[in-house]
Image (cartoon, rainbow, N blue to C red):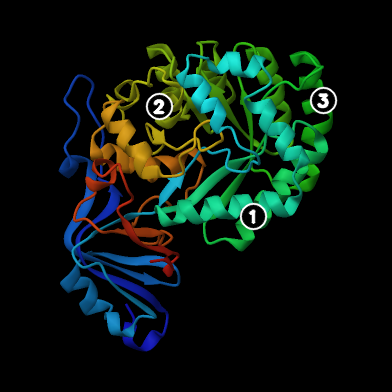
Amino acid sequence: MSDPGSTGDLDAVVHDAAEVVVGPAEGAGAEAGAPPPQADELLERHEDAAVAVVDGRVAAAGPTEAVTREYPPENAAEAVDAAGGAVIPGFVDAHTHALFAGDRSDEFEAKLRGKTYEDILAEGGGILRTVGAVRAADDGTLLSNLLTHLDRMLAAGTTTVEVKSGYGLDVETELRMLDVIDRADRRHPVDVVPTFMGAHAVPEGLDSGEYVDRVVEDQIPAVADQGIARFCDVFCEEGVFSVEESRRVLAAGAEAGMAPKVHAEELTHLGGTQLAAEVGATSADHLLHATDEDVSALREAGVTPVLLPGTAFGLGAEYADARRFLDGASWDGAAPVAVATDFNPNCYSRAMGFAASLSCVEMGMTPAESVLATTRGGAAALDLDDGRGTLGEGAPADLAVLSAPSHRYVPYNFGETTVRTVLKEGERVHG
């Protein structure tokens, strides 16, 4: 290894951390029927530790004395004293609808008075209300809104986020949304992964079959020509899109070069999970009503389940059973589960730490599992195989320094963020 003092490419050294979480430990997982693994079994981590970054990637993570001897902080462009805080990989938020306009806080109040999601939708609220607001907003407003949300996500430790279209429901507005998502990605430190979701709801005046024709025949070819979207998602749900309609959308998206994703078993059990397994989707998301058979199908197909506890919290609904996905599963290869925010006007939380808290308190995950699910799991749900979501050697140096000594504080401190400093590819971008 070359002398770091003479190379001039030492971007950063984060030193004197109480703990550095690298990622899943070798062979990490839970045996069927066994108690959830302890952190020492699940996480590769180092105490009294440091991370060195060369050319934007992790060059070393380990005991501070060893790392700083090889990579002296005084030779780095950025020296970060973790001051006894923990260091974790930056969060990878694998499911959001973060590009929108308008306000639906009144619907939150309506739900508290007993109205259901379906009641609100039938009265012209919900997704279609946001569609009207997005169609009426200019691109500058949409971009400003998204950049503001990204600022807040970054401050809470998110370094990669997926953002869906789907509040356009016509060719022009869907393309506008994807263009704004792309512009935000180029302007903001957070990496933004774009997903096309024209099949998010059925516009007024059409039935679902007529609208699917428009998605398949008009929207998908235009989105493919634009060349921005990486994924194609569909809301496979009773009263929205049937399994067969969803299959048509995903098949057309795949033929156009967009990998499939599925909103599945959120409000009812319809069969979206089995569809996700059938088409080899990158992820199946929500899964509040998934069965044991669904879990097995996803595992066998290598589809990453994405659990969204903030949605259940906002709806006052039952939570997905995370242990179904975790027990008997390994963190090697495809992750057994991801946890994401589902940030949208109906689930207004941008903080992955809060999603981690809910995953522990309401879904039975351990703190170590929740940290892996919000980092390595999120990367798997976006098919990011560059080491993102870990701090392994060669991985992008996306990391968060906590103002607390352990990864346990991510879900434990649910009232405020514990993130003090964020590095993106070794560059300080927050704190």
Disc 1 marks a residue whose amino acid type is Ser
Q: Does residue 194 sit above or below 218 in this rendering? A: below
> Split into 4 quadrants, where in the image is the N terminus?
bottom left
Q: Nearer the viewer, mark 2 or mark 3?
A: 2
Q: Disc 1 versus disc 2: distance between alpha carbons?
A: 28 Å
Type of residue at label 2? Answer: Phe
Q: Residue at x 51, y 11 (%)?
A: 268
N-terminal-most mark, 1 or 3:
1
Amino acid bearing label 3: Arg
Q: On the image, numbered disc 1 is attached to which residue?
A: 144
State the image coordinates of residue 270 (x, y, percent, origin top left). 55, 10
Q: Closer to the camera, 287 or 329?
A: 287
Residue 54 in picture, x, y percent from top left = 40, 73
Going from the N terminus, do you reach mark 2 or mark 3 first? Answer: 3
Secondary-structure class at tag 2: helix
Q: Which residue is mark 2?
A: 313
**Residue 27 in view in this figure:** no
| Crowding near the residue tagged with mark 1, few <14, some 14–19, many ≥20 C-alpha atoms within 10 Å | some
Indicate left or right for 206 with 286 as reference: right
Identify the element where label 1 is drawn: helix
Q: CA distance from mark 2 to mark 3?
A: 34 Å
